[in-house]
Image: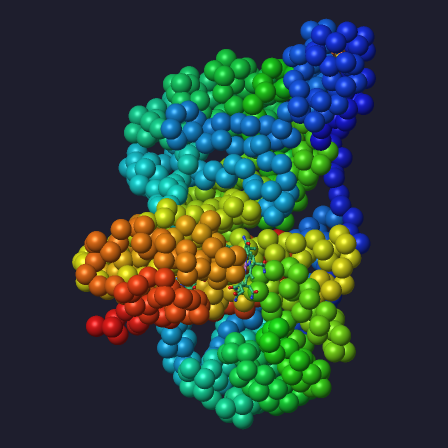
Amino acid sequence: MALTGVEIFKLLPKTNCKKCGHPTCLAFAMKLAQRQASLDACPDVSEEAKKVLGEASAPPIRSITLGSGDKAVKMGEENVLFRHEKRFVNPCAFAVEVKDSMSDDEINKIVDDVLNSEIDRVGQKLRIDAIFVSNASNDAGRFEGVVKAIASKAPAVPLIIATNNPAAAETAVKAVADKKPLLYGADESNADAMANIAKTYKIPLGVTAKGLDALTALTEKIKGLGVEDMVIDPCAKTAKEIIEANTYIRRAAIKKNFKALGYPVITLAQRDDKMLEALIAALGVTKYSSIVVLSSIKKWKNLSLFTLRQNIYTDPQVPMQVEQKVYKIGEATPESPLTITTNFSLTYFIVSGEIENSKVPTRLAVMDCEGLSVLTAWAAGKFTASKIAQFIQESGIENEITHKELIIPGYVAILSGAIEDKLPGWKVTVGPREANALPAFLKSRG
Amino acid sequence: MAFTAPKETYSGKVFEVAIGTDKTAVFGGENVLPFHSFEGNIPHRPVIAYEIQDVPPDDWPETVKKVYEGVSGDPVTWAKYCQDTLNAQAIALRLVGTHPDRENRSPEDAAKTVKDVLAAINVPLIILGSNQIEKDSAVLVSVSEAAKGKNCIIGKAQEGNYKTIAAAAMANNHKLIAMSELDINLSKQLNILITQMGFDKEKLITDPMCSALGYGLEYTYSVMERIRLAALTQNDTTMQPPMLADVGMYVWKIKETQASESDLPQWGLLAERGIAWETITAGSLLMSGAEFLIMRHPEAAKAVEKFIDELM
Ligand code: B12
Ligand code: SF4
């Protein structure tokens, strides 16, 4: 919650000295409130005022980075409770748990699965983002060994070092400090020692406490110890507890600017029942978790969770788009049919998927319609006969194919005559309305 | 600074809807956002109805078709299997066979199927048309009469056919699904048009149109959230009927529930993938406000029931 101009004014020197370039302190305060000026412009502002104003202008949920390098994951910075208000900012990270009590073979297998988890979907590369290594063995030496082994096998993958034993934490963190792991496991009993480690190695600290009162007290204490970057765990176990804690945390941060809970949330979703675990993870994705820890990463489960995260974190105002071009699906030859659609990612992936299903090599011309679906683009005047004709002419496709037949989506059958008028020599064929009828349609053309 | 729980107070409440006559099912009635029992009252769990058809499910993918092998040849056997073996709390009979492009079965045939199914079960029945605007007007009128007094849900009334369908549901004392196309204003407008005919708004169920995970789920999700917020925070009574997520039919037609492992090894096991797709679609729509779900795969439905157990 930002401060008003008058609230800011009260913190300024009130001398109207004009050094900031504004006629009065009040005028400067108003600009600050609108974020059109920076506090640095006033040379006389007190340290106290800087602190208060700095905190008030910080994002309600602190930005935290998990790991370092290419695969580092940004978390926090959220501004809203509901995705239709404004795009959710930093997609929730998925981590898989590795217990150091597992055999080396088991551990290697999980790490391999993480490294091979990447899937391309609607043009985005999606993967398991991090490994959560827990000190289940209670043996500090084993813990350090496992952390090191994982870091050397998967050097780019962010690590979460999970233990509430400061001695085990220290050796493990030290071994991989340059990778900026998250140290998870500060609680009421070990806060001083854990804060010290986080400070020494400049890494974020995962803070756990049962309930939001205790969590508030603990993050305040740790902040007092000099640690700014935290990830919080209210220790909610059941789905009911998770939705309550996460909702309160997000609301407190966004609506009340409550700094003590203005941190990304980590949710432990592990369950014996894999389908239930997927649902708890889905709860985390939809309801405000920034990290979800899973017990296993089956490919089918990953695919559904990645897709959900992608859906929830898309911009509600700007649809996802694919590049305008003529795509070849299968081993398309100059004789293969030519179809056309819009560049809304969803439309493209559905249609190209069905063309693939048909096993009939085909060209799919994808026209830029600002990411709108076929009917929406048509209704908005972006998928019109003249624009389609122009696109086909400018695409140069005429030089690549031996025929002049264009197959259009059934829903815009009404355009067929007008396109033929504007594309002399071309024949327009109306395809089926629904893409799922495309395989039968393409096959029947022999 | 001490933490004070930022509770919300809501001025509105979702209507409570009870269906069936023998064994009944009740959903809705809450005065808070989905599963926010920490700041209000949620008297009922969401209800899941198992979907069956009047014709064999030849077009369903293998994963879900094989569950009903041996029973799905006949809607009565299929319905009894869902009720007695799978413990379905409600059954949704979709009359796809009435579609002119399919078997084009007559309204009289549909009425007979409905009567037979009703005679065989004691859980509530949801009767759905084939989603062909003109044909549904005829079919849903005839099945409404056939099911008179059974307190069913009839669906779906849409902009193009709501008058006849709503009139039939009203005359035969059924609940009614009103479906519009993924737009909060269209949904509100349709509810208003239907209530202006004298249909009791507390007997409506809103279907804002479902979409599968990965295929527009975010649109359904956000429209549902906005409808719930309007119902609860603005006390907009036109937005207070419970909401339906018609999950199964949208999920089991997309590629992820059908593509083979050999074609797409990176997508993982086909059977689990399909079930997970239905499970996650349903689970997410519970988060955005659905109180009533129609699903196909029993394992997906059971996973969602466990999730609801944990949420309540
Ligand atoms: C979501 C949505 C929107 C979103 C946009 C989402 C997007 N990225 O396009 C928003 C909210 C922004 C929107 C806006 C508008 N919309 Co709109 N929208 C929809 C909605 C609900 C779904 C569209 C969708 O995503 N479909 C899914 C995609 C995959 O479908 P598709 O691209 O058509 O592809 C399918 C087929 O066409 C086929 N296909 C595609 N390509 C090809 C190619 C070949 C060769 C073949 C054979 C087949 C084929 O395969 C696909 C799957 O079967 C529809 C209603 C509905 N349920 O369809 C209305 C709808 C399309 N919108 C409509 C309208 C009028 C508009 C607006 C003009 C005003 C309004 N009512 O809000 C604006 C215009 C936008 C603008 N910028 O000016 C109307 C169009 C009316 C008509 N029949 O002409 C519809 C039908 C709703 C209605 N009944 O009134 N809309
Ligand atoms: S420089 Fe500072 S003290 Fe001077 S007018 Fe600007 S705000 Fe006031």
Q: Is residue A308 above or below residue A178?
A: below
Closest to the observer: A257 or A209? Answer: A257
Residue at (45, 40) in percent of width and height = A94
Q: For the C terminus of chain A, which image quadrant?
A: bottom left
Instruction: Tell me, yes or no, if residue B279 can be seen here.
Output: no
Compared across the picture, whether A30 is left or right of A151 comes to right
Could you say where residue B110 lies in the image, as x and y percent from the top left? Answer: 52, 88
Q: Is residue A357 above or below residue A221?
A: below
Q: For the N terminus of chain A, which image quadrant?
A: top right
Closest to the observer: A439 or A185? Answer: A439
Could you say where residue B287 lies in the image, as x and y percent from the top left? Answer: 60, 53
Residue at (40, 77) in percent of width and height = B57
Residue at (62, 73) in percent of width and height = B159
Closest to the observer: A336 or B234? Answer: A336
Could you say where residue A99 lies in the image, as x and y percent from the top left? Answer: 41, 35
Q: Quadrant of residue A13?
A: top right
Closest to the observer: A343 or A252? Answer: A343
Residue at (80, 54) in percent of width and height = B11
The total number of labels drawn is 0
Q: How is the image coloured?
A: rainbow
Q: Quadrant of residue B184?
A: bottom right
Q: Quadrant of residue B181?
A: bottom right
Q: Is residue A74 above or below residue A11?
A: below
Instruction: Tell me, yes or no, if residue A291 can be seen here.
Output: yes
Could you say where residue B187 lies in the image, as x and y percent from the top left? Answer: 65, 64
